[in-house]
């Protein structure tokens, strides 16, 4: 599909869990040649009647000596360039971290549609973190649970006008 959604965020926020939920078994490694950085996966995502390409940025497989922040910045740049829309995820249970703020700064300059998702929001544990995420300046954070499939209707409402 022509429309591409990139999943962006620091390690451990739940990007791959959401990727797997959207893509199921239709995933493919972008590049699995030996020695080539497997820095992202893409696949055909489905959400209700929408069909689109999803890109999962992996984060830690980049084997340079650069800082995590520098690696993630490069990876995010690539993903954003390729994407029509971006879903930035935070871990609502962990709250907003400095790395989340760096991502948000980068994404605000991308001039592409961005939806902010406070993942791990099942139950009440994520509510404080979700409210903190307003400070990232990316609009109203949706409450998402990639693991339990909550918040997908709001993701749908974000995507539908663009696809
Ligand atoms: P990634 O590094 O951003 O790709 O994050 P992963 O998808 O690998 O998830 C990191 C950890 O968070 C794993 O242990 C997941 O099971 C867990 N996780 C992902 N989504 C959720 C969620 O919605 N709720 C909770 N409680 N845990 C989650
Ligand atoms: Mg991952």
Image (cartoon, helix red, strand yellow):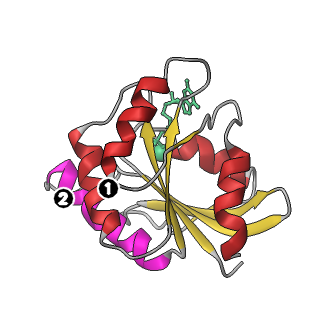
Tell me if residue 26 comes above or below residue 160 in the rendering.
Answer: above
Q: What secondary structure is found at the residue carrying circle 1?
A: helix
Question: Residue at image x 74%, y 50%?
Answer: 24
Q: Nearer the viewer, residue 154 or 61?
A: 154
Question: Residue at image x 35%, y 30%?
Answer: 95
Farthest-out residue, right: 49
Residue 49: horizontal and vertical position, in percent? 86, 63
Tell me if residue 4 comes above or below residue 15 in the rendering.
Answer: below
Is residue 134 visible to the viewer in this orientation of the structure? yes
Please identify the quadrant where the C terminus is shown.
bottom right
Res. 110 image quadrant: bottom left
Q: Earlier in the sequence, mark 1 or mark 2?
A: 2
**Image depth: mark 1 or mark 2 in front:** 1
Q: Which residue in the structure is indicated by mark 2? A: 70
Q: Nearer the viewer, residue 77 or 92?
A: 92
Q: What secondary structure is found at the residue carrying circle 2?
A: helix
Q: Main secondary structure of the magenta part?
A: helix
Residue 35 sits inside the magenta stretch: no
Tell me if residue 141 comes above or below residue 33 in the rendering.
Answer: above
Residue 120: horizontal and vertical position, in percent? 54, 29
Residue 130: horizontal and vertical position, in percent? 45, 34
Which dot marks residue 104?
Answer: 1
Question: Residue at image x 30%, y 72%?
Answer: 109
Label 1 to label 2: alpha-carbon separation? 14 Å
Query: Is 71 on the left-hand or right-hand side of 40?
Result: left
Residue 80 sits inside the magenta stretch: yes
Magenta segment boundaries in residue numbering: 67-82
Q: Alpha-carbon neighbours of circle 1 within 10 Å: few (<14), some, or many (≥20)? A: many
Q: Nearer the viewer, residue 14 or 157?
A: 157
Is residue 27 visible to the viewer in this orientation of the structure? no
């Amino acid at each position: 599909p022509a429309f591409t959604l990139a999943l962006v965020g620091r390690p451990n926020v739940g990007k791959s869990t959401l990727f797997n939920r959207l893509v199921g078994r239709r995933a493919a490694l972008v590049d699995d040649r030996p020695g080539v950085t497997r820095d992202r996966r893409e696949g055909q995502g489905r959400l209700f009647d929408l069909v689109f390409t999803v890109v999962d940025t992996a984060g830690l497989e980049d084997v340079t000596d650069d800082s995590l922040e520098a690696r993630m910045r490069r990876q995010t740049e690539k993903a954003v360039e390729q994407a029509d829309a971006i879903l930035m995820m935070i871990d609502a249970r962990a709250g907003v971290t400095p790395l989340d703020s760096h991502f948000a700064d980068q994404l605000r300059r991308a001039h592409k549609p961005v939806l902010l998702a406070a993942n791990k929001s099942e139950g009440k544990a994520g509510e404080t973190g979700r409210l903190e995420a307003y400070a990232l300046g990316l609009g109203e954070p949706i409450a998402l649970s990639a693991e339990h499939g909550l918040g997908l209707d709001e993701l749908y409402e974000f995507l539908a006008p663009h696809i």
